[in-house]
Image (spheres, helix red, strand yellow):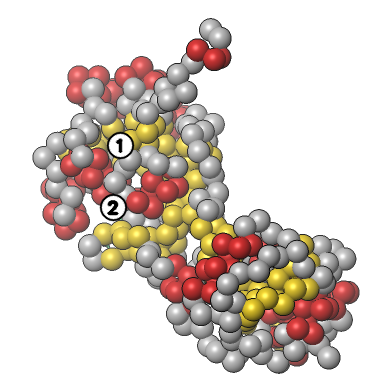
């Protein structure tokens, strides 16, 4: 058929009622699509799914929750605790894949969630529960069912610590959307990202906190990430980064110590190791930062992972500050990408980043040369790392 005759709104989106989940999905679940929610055990996948289904059921959708791991009583207790006990939320405790399909066909729900895909199996198919062949078979049958009946389908998948997922990795090409639910077991912060998304952007970050009443959105992430910052400490520089469409201020930290090993170590946490090695080289070569023979540690405080070059300049200055022991003024925020020549490059949406920094009370920003003025914050435009080091008092 002519492409122009296709209804562009052919796949309606149903908001899940969980704001941070909707943010990552680009508005909600698409009818007839399959979304895989992967994460380590204990992250809160079952909680997230129950909150979403409860909210969608309360909004009038016919929702079926297939619990293959927990009893109906356990789920009922959790729903009571979360206050998501909607009358139209149906539950089936079932591990047999053919039975799950039969339920879906007879109920024709708008939304179905299977928790988890590793725990359901077809007794007549080869492989035990959780085996790659069973998991793949389960996902492709869920995909067929979703397409035939127009059901928005959510699959929960367990991911092990080392990332070797006896499931989700094998499923990525079978499903339409892959969400990853991450966090540190010892912290309440949870991050939701789309690794693959046929119906929207993949760069949105959802931020939630696990509380006694379930998952709640983080209302002011920057304030949360900067809450425990030690003012006046060397090796600490605040960067204004962009996570999806949201500007965030995060503290880039660095620590350098004389190495005891033949090869100095470069350890990056919540930050790409290769990028750290590159920034160490740039700082040494282009700004004369003394890092030879030193172990270098770099991290992003607060647990959020920064995968954006806009934090380059801040981390390079954190290295210079750690190496010299001179702190960078606490009211200073830094934005900019670094090239191998030590040049500072412009980053997308600089204005929104600086507005976020200004809102948080930062008075001065070290920014790329082409940055436009932003009300309420004094800009110091720099062209290279050396100039930025001088502007922050780290170089004479
Ligand atoms: P769960 O959703 O069961 O994780 P997953 O399905 O990913 O394995 O929940 C994980 C943890 O969260 C569990 O140890 C208890 C805790 N929790 C809360 O702190 N608050 C809550 O309201 C709920 C439901 C769970
Ligand atoms: Mg679970």
Q: Is residue 330 above or below residue 109?
A: below
Does the beta carbon at disc 2 come under 8 Å from ligand 1?
Answer: yes
Question: Mark 1 highlights which residue?
Answer: 113
Residue 345 spot, x, y in % from top left? 77, 62
- Between 44 and 381, the one lying in front of the other is 381
Task: Kindly give the residue lying farthest to the top in the view shown.
Answer: 1
Badge 1 crowding class, 10 Å Cα cut-off, few under 14, some 14 to 19, many 20 or more, is: many
- Residue placed at 23% from the left, 45% from the top? 55
Q: SS for tag 1?
A: strand
Task: Kindly give the residue lying farthest to the left in the view shown.
Answer: 87
Please state if 337 lies on the left or on the right of 172 as rendered: right
Can residue 1 be seen from the camera position used here?
yes
**The C terminus sits in image quarter:** bottom right
Badge 2 crowding class, 10 Å Cα cut-off, few under 14, some 14 to 19, many 20 or more, is: some
Question: Mark 2 highlights which residue?
Answer: 47
- Residue placed at 40% from the left, 41% from the top? 27
Can residue 297 be seen from the camera position used here?
no
Q: Is residue 370 above or below residue 17?
A: below
């Amino acid at each position: 058929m002519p492409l122009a005759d296709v209804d562009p709104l052919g796949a309606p989106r149903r908001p899940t009622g969980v704001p941070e989940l909707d943010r990552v999905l680009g508005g909600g679940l698409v009818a007839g699509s399959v979304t895989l929610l992967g994460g380590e055990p204990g992250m809160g996948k079952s909680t997230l799914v129950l909150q979403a289904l409860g909210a969608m059921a309360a909004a009038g959708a016919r929702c079926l929750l297939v619990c293959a791991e927990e009893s109906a009583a356990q789920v009922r207790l959790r729903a009571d605790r979360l206050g998501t006990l909607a009358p139209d939320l149906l539950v089936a405790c079932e591990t047999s894949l053919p039975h799950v399909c039969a339920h879906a066909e007879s109920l024709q729900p708008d939304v179905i969630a299977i928790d988890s895909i590793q725990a359901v199996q077809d007794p007549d198919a080869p492989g035990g529960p959780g085996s790659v062949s069973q998991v793949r078979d389960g996902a492709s049958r869920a995909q067929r069912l979703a397409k035939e009946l127009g059901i928005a389908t959510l699959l929960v998948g367990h991911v092990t610590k080392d990332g070797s997922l006896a499931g989700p990795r094998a499923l990525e090409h079978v499903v339409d959307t892959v969400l990853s639910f991450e966090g540190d077991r010892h912290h309440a912060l949870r991050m939701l990202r789309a690794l693959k998304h046929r119906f929207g952007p993949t760069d949105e970050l959802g931020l939630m906190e696990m509380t006694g009443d379930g998952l709640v959105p983080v209302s002011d992430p920057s304030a949360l990430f900067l809450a425990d910052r030690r003012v006046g400490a060397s090796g600490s520089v605040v960067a204004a980064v962009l996570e999806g469409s949201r500007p965030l201020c995060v503290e880039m930290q660095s620590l350098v110590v004389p190495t005891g090993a033949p090869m100095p170590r470069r350890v990056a946490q919540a930050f790409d190791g290769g990028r750290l090695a590159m920034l160490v080289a740039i700082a040494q070569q282009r700004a004369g930062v003394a890092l030879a023979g030193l172990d270098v540690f770099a991290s992003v405080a607060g647990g959020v992972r920064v995968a954006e070059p806009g934090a380059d300049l801040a981390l390079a200055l954190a290295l210079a500050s750690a190496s010299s022991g001179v702190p960078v003024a606490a009211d200073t925020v830094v934005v900019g990408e670094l090239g191998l020549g030590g040049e500072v490059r412009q980053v997308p949406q600089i204005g929104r980043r600086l507005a976020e920094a200004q809102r948080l009370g930062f008075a001065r920003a070290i920014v790329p040369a082409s940055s436009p003025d932003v009300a309420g914050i004094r800009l110091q435009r720099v062209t290279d790392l050396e100039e930025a080091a001088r502007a922050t008092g780290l170089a004479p």
